[in-house]
Image (cartoon, helix red, strand yellow):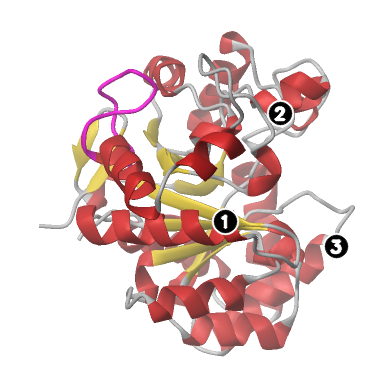
């Protein structure tokens, strides 16, 4: 029977409710800490819990926390503050991307890159499987998604080894898969490897493709059956919001509405409303973006309210299940 694995245990997909498909809650990435980039350190229990409370008040129920071990994951803290805020969390097993691997592994005295280089594909798979079946960060809290990532217009040998190990872990556990694409690049190259390994494309969600709003590429990805995580909302420094809406509605026109999900990918203190820097926060998508999308979808001849329900309630029921 299909189920979704949260930090509090396994639940029915019907219990997910309104779901953000990619976000970060509390994390202290080693690389950014070592570089002194404080904006990328989500290190306040109180502020992060306040953000989850904002999300819940806006009608949110579940968040996929895409924070892997190499991005400063602290699943025990996330579980504690999520429970206090009344929010369900799906946690991440696996890895992010090679750009993070110069960071020092806590308590190990070596970098993530050195550790990954020392392990075989089979050993990396065993590590990820353990995070799904036994627990993460010294806890019994189990991962609900397995993740890999690749760089900007590049895929290193180490990233390929990790990608293949994560696919192996998916085969062993039945966990859903999530991939990071840097600025929306390398999605088709990732999919070539997923296909080569005989993995069902519908088990994969690809993040950040709205940062590369290429209609041809989006159509080719969609034709494989993979899910899209549109998670660049508010980032006008890349594209204005109407570009993202056009990408989403194009997928709907092409018959791929069942593959779209929405998230915020908030990973900076300055993006949160509760870290004291005036950010838009975790309530913005539900409170501001959703009404705008419904209006624009209506102007284009679609039922925007029905589409939002599909993107944020119905599609996550299929994307985040174990099979």
| Residue 145 position in % (x across, y down) | 37, 48
Closer mark to the observer between disc 3 and disc 1: 1
- Image position, residue 230 (x, y; %): 62, 60
Compute the Cα span from label 2 to label 3: 27 Å
- Residue 120's label in the rendered image is none
Q: Is residue 35 left or right of residue 75?
A: right
What span is in magenta? 133-144
The vertical placement of 11 against 229, above or below, is: above
N-terminal of the pair, mark 3 or mark 1, is 1
- Label 1 and label 2: CA atoms lie apart by 17 Å
Residue 213 on the magenta segment: no
Q: Earlier in the sequence, mark 2 or mark 3?
A: 2
Residue ID at (67%, 83%): 217
x 28%, y 28%: residue: 135
For the N terminus, the image quarter is: bottom left
The residue pinned by badge 2 equals 31
Element carrying mark 2: helix
As measured in the structure, the alpha-carbon distance from the residue carrying label 3 to the one carrying label 1 is: 28 Å
Foreground label between 1 and 2: 1
For label 1, the crowd category at 10 Å Cα-Cα, with few meaning under 14, some 14 to 19 and many 20 or more, is many
Identify the secondary structure beneath mark 1.
Answer: helix
Residue at label 1?
Answer: 159
Main SS of the magenta segment?
A: loop
Element under label 3?
loop
Q: Position of residue 179 (x, y in %)?
A: 52, 58
């Amino acid at each position: 029977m299909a189920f979704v694995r949260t930090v509090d245990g396994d639940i029915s997909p019907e219990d997910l409710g309104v779901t953000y498909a990619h976000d970060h809650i509390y994390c202290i990435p080693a690389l950014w800490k070592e570089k002194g980039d404080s904006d990328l350190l989500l290190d306040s229990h109180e502020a992060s819990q306040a953000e989850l409370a904002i999300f819940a008040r806006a009608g949110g129920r579940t968040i996929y926390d895409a924070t892997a071990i190499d991005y400063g994951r602290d699943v025990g803290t996330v579980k504690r503050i999520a429970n206090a805020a009344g929010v369900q969390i799906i946690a991440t097993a696996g890895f992010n991307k090679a750009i993070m691997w110069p960071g020092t592994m806590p308590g190990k005295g070596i970098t993530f890159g050195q550790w990954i280089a020392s392990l075989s594909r089979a050993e990396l798979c065993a590590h990820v499987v353990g995070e799904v079946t036994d627990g993460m960060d010294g806890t019994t809290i189990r991962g609900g998604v397995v993740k890999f990532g690749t760089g900007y217009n590049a895929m290193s040998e180490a990233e390929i080894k990790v990608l293949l190990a994560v696919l192996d872990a998916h085969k062993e556990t039945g966990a859903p898969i999530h991939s990071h694409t840097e600025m929306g690049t390398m999605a088709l190259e990732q999919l070539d490897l997923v296909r080569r390994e005989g993995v069902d494309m519908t088990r994969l969600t690809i993040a950040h493709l709205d940062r590369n709003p290429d209609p041809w590429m989006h159509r080719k990805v969609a034709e494989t059956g993979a899910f899209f995580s549109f998670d660049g909302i508010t980032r006008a420094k890349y594209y204005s919001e109407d570009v993202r809406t056009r990408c989403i509605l194009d997928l709907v026109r092409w018959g791929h509405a069942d593959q779209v999900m929405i998230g915020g990918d908030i990973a900076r203190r300055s993006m949160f409303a509760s870290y004291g820097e005036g950010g838009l926060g975790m309530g913005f998508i539900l409170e501001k973006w959703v009404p705008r999308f419904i209006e624009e979808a209506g102007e284009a001849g679609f039922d925007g309210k029905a589409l939002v329900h599909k993107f944020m309630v119905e599609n996550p029921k299929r994307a985040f299940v174990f099979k």
